[in-house]
Image: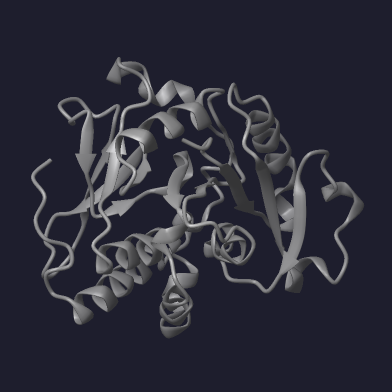
Amino acid sequence: MPAMRIVVSLTTLPERWHLLVRTLESIQRQTQPPAAIYLWLPRERFGEEVPQDYCFSGVDVRLSADLGPAMKLLPVLDIETDPETRIVTIDDDVEYPPGLIARLAELSNLYPDHALGFTGWVLDQPTAPTGVIHLNTSTMGSARFQPVHVLEGYRGVLYKRCFFDRAIWDHLNALSAFRWHDDILLSGYLGSRGIERLVCRYNPDPLQEAYHWKLNGDDIGLHTTTDWLEQGRSCVAYWLARDPCLFAPIIP
């Protein structure tokens, strides 16, 4: 069996450089190094040349059109075309545990047809959503392998390249709110293709789970904006309008 190719992809903004540096350092300390690290810079914010401060050793830095946070995944689909390649998306303001890539590789061997992460949401009223049940593996009573409606990206998510085709771009462009909520864009799209989303444990001890990630920008993310929740509801409504059964009930 050929070795699994795993790449990491993320995006950032100019004002977040001080957070990005620590994130990249944590990925470069992985016990199982990724085959490539892609950093996507929105051309509208950075201009036509990669700034010298962003020329990190061992990181493939590229400019692209601004897609919002979905930029962490969508441009890399044009580069990594092998359907078996695993793409791990991360945020630019989190320091990741050194075993992140190794753990995701292990999980992908167990569940090769699932998108995998470490935290996610279950919609508590799928037909008229007013909120979510937030599940992560530090939640007491949560299963070791927990199906979710939406994988939450900040702890890292693994996708197989074959999960995506060009239709994902059509959905991104169909609703402006997806530029705020890449998690709902991507998980809704996967659900529409019958691809399950699974939250897994990083550590056998759920009480220790949250200590493996260090969040450095939790007070400045998109989730702090006043209309973030309303934008999320419109994203959920978009998918439900196409398939009312897309977010079928899940019992945590």
Residue 213 seen in the current view:
no
Query: Residue 208 versus residue 57: which sits nearer the camera?
Result: 57
Snapshot colouring: one colour
Q: Position of residue 105 (x, y in %)?
A: 45, 33
* Snapshot quadrant of residue 186: bottom left
Left or right: 132, with 10 as reference point: left
Q: Position of residue 88 (x, y in %)?
A: 51, 45
Q: Residue drawn at (56%, 42%), measured in percent from left and top?
A: 5
Q: Position of residue 9 (x, y in %)?
A: 60, 50
Residue 244 seen in the current view:
yes
Give the answer, above or below, for where 134 lies relative to 223. above
Q: Position of residue 185 (x, y in %)?
A: 39, 67
Q: Residue drawn at (29%, 30%), measured in percent from left and top?
A: 137
Q: Residue drawn at (50%, 71%), measured in percent from left and top?
A: 179
Give the answer, above or below, for where 45 lies relative to 39. below
In the image, farthest residue toward the right = 52
Query: Residue 26 versus residue 235: which sits nearer the camera?
Result: 26
Left or right: 46, with 225 as reference point: right
Q: Quadrant of the C terminus?
A: top left
Q: Residue drawn at (36%, 43%), measured in percent from left and top?
A: 116
* Snapshot quadrant of residue 11: bottom right
Query: Residue 1 versus residue 48: which sits nearer the camera?
Result: 1
In the image, farthest residue toward the front = 1
